[in-house]
Structure formats: C-alpha cells, structure tokens
Image (cartoon, rainbow, N blue to C red):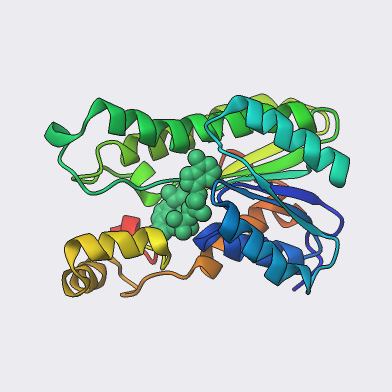
Amino acid sequence: MSGRLDGKVVLLTGAASGIGAATTELMLGEGARVVATDVDVARGEALVARLSAQAPGRIVFLRLDVAQEAQWEAALAQAAARFAPIDVLVNNAGVAPALVPLAQTTLDEWRRVMSINLDGAFLGVKHAIRAMTGRGGAIVNVSSVAGLVGMPLNGAYSPAKAGVLLLTKCAALECAQMDPPIRVNAVHPGYIRTDMVGAISDTLGAERFERRVRKTVPLKRLGDAQDIAEAIVFLASSQSKFTTGSSLVVDGGWTAQ
Ligand SMILES: NC(=O)c1ccc[n+]([C@@H]2O[C@H](COP(=O)([O-])OP(=O)(O)OC[C@H]3O[C@@H](n4cnc5c(N)ncnc54)[C@H](O)[C@@H]3O)[C@@H](O)[C@H]2O)c1
C-alpha cells in the first residue's frame, strides 16, 4: 500500500535512528513531506542525505532537543515555512537508562529520563495542538510496554512511559471536541531491534538477553523497527480515522500473558 500520507506534513522526533528512521522512510514512501528532527545532527543529516534521493524536496532535517520548549516553537515555525503547518506529529524521541535498582537511581538520572521521555512528549503535544487547531491532524506518541506493566530495574523509564499513555488519553479527549478533531494515539513497542535494545543486550550479555527474549516474548523474537513504523503510519493516516485515545501494543504477545 502507498499514498496513505499523500501531501501531509509530518514532524518526527528522534528520527535519526531506529524506530524514528524506519518511520521516516516509510512515511516518505506513503507520500508525506517529512521534517526529521533529532539531537544527533550527524546521523540525522546522513539519513536525510540517503532518503533525499528517493523523495527529492520532501525531507528536511532540523536539530530539535525535545526537552527544550523554545526549540519546539522554532522547529514548528521552520516546518511551516519550509512545507506548511504540520498535519502529523510523531513523538518518538526517547532514552532508556541503564538497568538500575530504584535504590541506586539518582535524582539527576530520574529527571533526565522524565525530561526527554515525558516532558518532551508533553511539549510536542502542546505545540502540535496549537499548530493543528482549526485544521485537524494526528499525533502519535511512542510509549512502551514498559508504560503498561511494571518492570524491575526500570523505575524511571516505566513511569515516564506510563505518563506518555495518560498524556495521550487526556489529549485525545480534549482534542476530540475540536472541529475538525485532532486524533491522539499511543504505540507500545516491546523489544525492538535498535540501538536502545542493543545497549540492554550489552549490559545483560547477548546470550542472557537472547534467553530472556525467548522466555518473555510469545513470538520468540525481537521486533523490527519496521513493525513499529507500520503501526505509527496506521495511526497517522485516515485508515484509523475513528481511533483516538488508543494504545496499539506491538510486542510479539509479551503483555498478553
Ligand atoms: N527499541 C525498543 O525496544 C523500544 C521499546 C519500547 C519503546 N521504545 C521507544 O521507541 C522510541 C524510539 O527508540 P529506538 O529504539 O528507536 O531508540 P534509538 O536509541 O535507536 O533512537 C532514539 C533517538 O532519540 C534521539 N534522542 C535522544 N534524546 C533526544 C532528545 N532530547 N531530543 C531529541 N531526540 C533525542 C536519539 O538521538 C536517537 O536518534 C523511544 O521513545 C523508545 O523509548 C523502544
């Protein structure tokens, strides 16, 4: 299928790597004009250079640290000047800290994880609503299975991702009243093969991590970034036009148990 986002202007955060990069590529294939943003400028620009060939004039890279409100305002203004006001926001940027017991988690680390994963999503939702009011649109927030169930050694990341889920529901209810409405939905990935999971595997050791995946995930494998990109495109497109405030779990069955 292609053309599901024809002419739409999309801003993605954390676009330089993993799920963000796969979603950027899929959205270009669906006809979108994409503002790819990240704090990693070198990787972001390399991605845009690679994808520009297949979508000339339809992709641009901007540096955006999602925890900085002034940078959101600047990025949305630049997106509007370059293409048009955004129709879709994908709040994807996130960090997963090292697996650490709560008793050893510093307040600085807690605040770092909250500021990128939850403040960043809040700022994106806030400014996207402003940009979309009167025109409608779709916001997709990338949470995690860790936002649905508690996990040991994830005492900062899990609460941040649970916050993203309730932010999604509150925003969806506010925005359903609008004419036209802005839809707001969340995606909850399980273990997905990206740098983030590579870091967990490095910490636990590859063999132990492999055993954990086979034991935890009914489909007995890691997901691919493409699996999450497909879910995000569905929620961003009119295929999901009656869906708002929902949680799309893409986890190989992990949280069905
Ligand atoms: N990989 C998984 O298994 C998994 C599982 C559940 C949820 N997630 C979530 O999916 C999203 C994407 O993760 P990924 O696996 O692709 O990880 P990744 O590490 O490959 O990509 C994350 C991107 O976010 C960017 N980033 C970090 N801090 C930022 C900031 N302050 N502002 C803007 N960009 C910033 C990084 O530079 C990087 O490009 C994250 O929100 C993550 O929590 C991932």
Extreme residue in the left direction: 103
| Quadrant housing the N terminus | bottom right
Task: Name the residue: 55% across, 50% down.
Answer: 14
Position of the C terminus by quadrant: bottom left
Q: Is residue 152 left or right of residue 12?
A: left
Above or below, comparing residue 150 to residue 72 in the picture: below
Give the x, y percent position of residue 65: 56, 38
Residue 179 drawn at (x, y percent): 82, 29
Residue at left offset 37%, top offset 33%: 112
Quadrant hosting residue 183: top right
- Residue 189 seen in render: no
Q: Is residue 68 above or below residue 150?
A: above
Residue 50 appearing in the image? yes
User: Residue 111's quadrant in the figure?
Assistant: top left
Between 230 and 59, the one nearer to me in the picture: 59
* Vertical order, 198 against 214 (above or below): above
Please give the name of the residue rendered at 73% of the width and 25% of the height, measured from the top-left corner.
177
Percent across and percent down for residue 187 are 51, 50
Residue most extreme to the front: 42
**Viewer-side residue, 64 vs 206:** 64
Tell me the residue at 63%/65% (across/down): 46
Find residue 254 and report its horizontal and vertical position in percent: 32, 60
